[in-house]
Image (cartoon, rainbow, N blue to C red):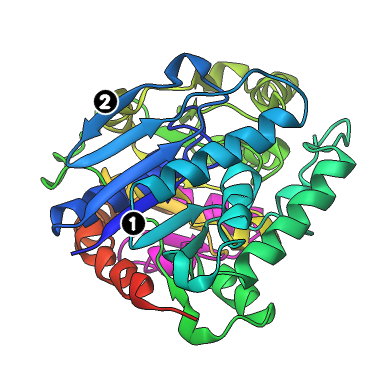
Amino acid sequence: MMRVVMIGPFGLRPRGTMSVRALPMARALAARGHTVTLLLPPWQNREDAGQCEEDAGVRVENIPLPPRVPLLFHLWTARRLAVRALALRPDVIHFFKPKAYSGLAHFLLTLRTRSRRPRLVVDSDDWEGPGGWNDMTDPVSGQFLYTPAQRRFFAWQERWGLTHADAVTVASRTLESLVWALGVPPGQVFYIPNGWAGPEAPPSLRTDKGPPVILLYTRFFEFPVSRVVGLLRRVQERVPQARLRVVGKGLFGEETRLLEEARRAGLAEAVEYVGWVEPERLPEVFGQVTLAIYPFDDTLINRAKCPVKLLDLLGAGVPVVAEAVGEIREVIRHGETGWLVPPGDEAAFAGAVLRLLDERDLCRRLGMEAARDIRERRSWTRLVTEVEWAYEVRR
């Protein structure tokens, strides 16, 4: 059995990587007898600093944070992560994202000779550099999410971190290819997609009472909101009683733009914006919809993702119509566990939604098979064996 330390770039909230990827992975490792500690710098939630808890056999430590002194705060936070990780005497340190504090801690630990440090594994669940999060902008103002200095630094961190690890774990086939392209040998790269961390029991059957409700469960940055309004318009031409329920919150206020575009299109009464929903309430929300749509532009940032929200929908038994981009093609088997449409084809997207609204038996069958399939193929109990293989590799 191994002693494993996982280091994150932020806390368990509000961002999702550590809560929806690292923590379920850690729980699965703990269930197999490994000793696992999550080290987190909760800089977005300073009230969590210094707090520790046990979660299904995993120790979660939110490190104390230093005073917010420019530059020194970043260096001392990374140093505290590295020092605490070594104090736990692990066999493996797994860094989640090759950027920010986890990336800095990785750099500090490589200053030790290889014989005096544990195996260092880096996880990538997004592409950060050119074409990825570094190029994320407000779709209206064009303002970048990061400053020019941050973009340059994150691009360097990503390239350096992925090429200076004993092994790399990736959440998508696109990331796998990108890491290979950096010169990392295939034997050091492990494809570990996001897994299902929900209940083992399948969801209850859905009802068809009331008007059809189409769910959009999203963070918005994956597509322009105008496409959703256009899709709803096409659907309402055939099914005027259809409604769109929107769950989620955008990075740049995209939800406001969606509601405004729906109003201008005369569809305001057909759109219900729910906002961000606590995870424990999601089953209730999912149980009240007929099907879900998953628009996904064919971009590098989307191809590199393994969308957890899609897994949430499928695992809950929600029939999904999605654009066949990147990892979505790995998750959904067309016509069996969901319905795939060509990316950017609005007519095909609307046609698929209308078909499932007309053929409710097909719709229900897709949802039931999706829930079964996700629990079988994407359970962390199954995926964790590949994590163990990654931990055994040394350059």
**Which quadrant of the structure image shows residue 181?**
bottom right
- Is residue 230 positioned above or below 283 on the image? below
Q: Position of residue 336 (x, y in %)?
A: 30, 66
**Which quadrant of the structure image shows residue 288?**
top left
Position of residue 207 in the picture relative to residue 67 (left or right): left
| Residue that mark 2 sits on | 284
- Is residue 272 positioned above or below 310 on the image? above
Position of residue 150 in the picture relative to residue 24 (left or right): right
Residue 319 seen in this snapshot: no
Q: Nearer the viewer, mark 2 or mark 1?
A: 1
Q: Residue at x 26, y 28 (%)?
A: 53
Q: Amino acid at mark 1?
A: Pro
Q: Position of residue 103 (x, y in %)?
A: 61, 51
Q: Position of residue 96 (x, y in %)?
A: 50, 51
- In the image, residue 297 lies in the stretch drawn in magenta: no
Question: What's the distance in space between the residues labelled 2 and 1, CA to CA?
Answer: 41 Å
Query: Which residues lie in the magenta part?
Result: 326-354
Q: Amino acid at mark 2?
A: Glu
Q: Residues within 10 Å of mark 2 (few under 14, many from 20)?
A: few
- Is residue 131 positioned above or below 287 on the image? below
Query: Which of pointers 2 and 1 lies earlier in the amino acid sequence?
Result: 1
Q: Position of residue 155 (x, y in %)?
A: 76, 57
